Image: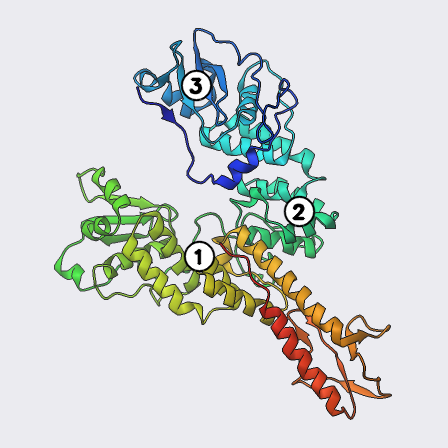
Amino acid sequence: MTSVTLSTPSTDSSISAKLSDLKPAPSCDAITTTSSTHPVFVVSHPFDVKTSCAVRLRSADNVDFFVNAVIATMASPVFAKMLLPGNIENLAREEDGTAIIHLPEWRAVVVDTILRIIYPSMRNPDIPSVSHIYAVLKAARQFDMGLVQQVAQSSLAQFVPSDPVRVFAVACAFGFEKEAADAAQAAIHCRKAFQHFRFEYLPEMQDVSAGMMSRFSFFVNKFGSVPNAFSFIYPTAGASPALSSGYSGIKPGAELIKVADSCTLTHAIFSRIPNDLIVYSSVNAEETFSTHKFAVMVSSPVLADRLRDVSLSGLPKLVLPESVEVLRCLLRNCYRALNLDVDVVDERAGGDRTRCLVGVALAAAKYKMAAVVKLAHGDLLSLIETLDPLEAYFVASLFGWEVEARLAARNAVEMLPDFHYVPVMEEASAMSYTRLLQYRVSVQEAVKGVVKEYVCTNSYFTSPVWFVGISPPEQTVPAPKDYMQNYCGVSLPVFVPTAPSESYHNLRRALEVNVKAAADEVVLEFD
């Protein structure tokens, strides 16, 4: 018999490692430690007793829980399908005949918490940490357990005062706007927590975008003074200086680019070979694309499998979750992959060309369109040097382009007084954002170290104003425009003598050279 294993592709090893350090909820019985690395979980009542209608749930750390099949079926559609007659016979069996469901991603402490929530007449367990809530929520989403999600969500509130950044990350990952807002508000009163966010990436940020963390930073720095419609999960008007007051809120999958009047794919091939496939977006079913099944199936083995299952009665239709503009670009790239000369982006459509190209590259990767991925990457690389440095950094980080990411990060730190919002942050990861923040702090510390060696601070000014070893003259004037007055956010001497000596000029030039050299030595963290 085959063993059935449940898995979620999005869960990575960093999260699994974090879960291994979790302790069981206080409602569980004691843990005995036999190894300095992993504790051994002891199953307690009622999951330690086999009954006639029980199945075994086997955790990642090989702990077996005896679970009533009826309760498991009622709590989870996923378990219900596996335990249907005809399916349950395919499960692996223990020697005593009990069916086994393997849960390779979830340690016993997580499984125990979930079971104590779904079992009737049992008190909801105490959840010991935000990390534990995160694991329980991920498992609840995998098994489609609404009750478990409700209990875990309500448990977040108790950790808002002590761990607001982590709560914010979990809330954003699961779309809990209220909890995200409460955590951000708490972070305003906990500057230490905000500094913690600036310097450290948390495992719970795995499913959080750079855009969400940017809005968190913006909210805290504004001390919560934002419009009433402000949202952390979706960009809205007033979410950053770069979003104008006329900007409408974006919901998941909503149109990010103004669609042209016609969605027709124009090429001579359509006059020679009639289209035999209709493609449209689930976001906007009114806009459809007439295309060729052959072009789509050759480009994507994933979509080819889906089209084989499409009914042959009438013109087949394919519904995809991408936006209308991304679908237009994606389909045109299918033809480009066949050496048909079409543009990747419809120039009649206004809006964010960069984000459209990013959407095409990500969709092409999801549908395993290798040739289209190559084309989209080429288009982005040819565009990246012309982009705002912050936009270029997030694009490069998103696709693992290390050289371009390091150059863009260096330019962003040097050229931008602060990090503004760019739409591609919605696709970029929170890790790329926190790394950029850390890089900026490291560069500034390096520059400050050089400035400290050269200049002193007047008691009346917070900025460095004069060079060590040179006596301040009686009269000074503001530094001329060709003198750097700020580098990477660090102030340089702001006054010069009315008649500066050669020694002064030499020190000033040496300072500028050395602060640039110090900044160049700082390396952006990159995988």
**CA distance separating discs 1 and 2:** 30 Å
**CA distance separating discs 1 and 3:** 42 Å
Residue 517: quadrant of the picture: bottom right
Name which residue lies at 63% across and 79% down.
Answer: 513
Q: Is residue 227 visible?
A: no
Q: Decide if residue 508 is on the left or right side of residue 366.
A: right
Q: Which residue is mark 1?
A: 400
Q: Which mark is first along the chain, 3 or 2? A: 3
Does the CB distance between marks 1 and 3 fall below 8 Å?
Answer: no
299 relative to 471, above or below: above
**CA distance separating discs 2 and 3:** 38 Å
Residue at the top extreme of this rendering: 52
Rendered location of residue 89, percent (x, y): 32, 16
Amino acid carrying label 1: it is Gly
Q: Which residue is mark 3?
A: 73
Q: Nearer the viewer, residue 248 or 117?
A: 117
* Neighbourhood count class around disc 1 (C-alpha, 10 Å): few under 14, some 14–19, many 20 upward: few
The local secondary structure at tag 2 comes to: helix
Rendered location of residue 127, percent (x, y): 63, 28
Q: Which residue is mark 2?
A: 184
Q: Decide if residue 109 is on the left or right side of residue 514.
A: left
Residue 4: quadrant of the picture: top left
Coloring scheme used: rainbow
216 relative to 478, above or below: above
Q: Which mark is first along the chain, 2 or 1? A: 2
244 relative to 176, above or below: below
Q: Which mark is first along the chain, 3 or 1? A: 3
Tag shown at residue 335: none
Amino acid carrying label 2: it is Ala
The local secondary structure at tag 3 comes to: helix
Rendered location of residue 277, percent (x, y): 21, 48
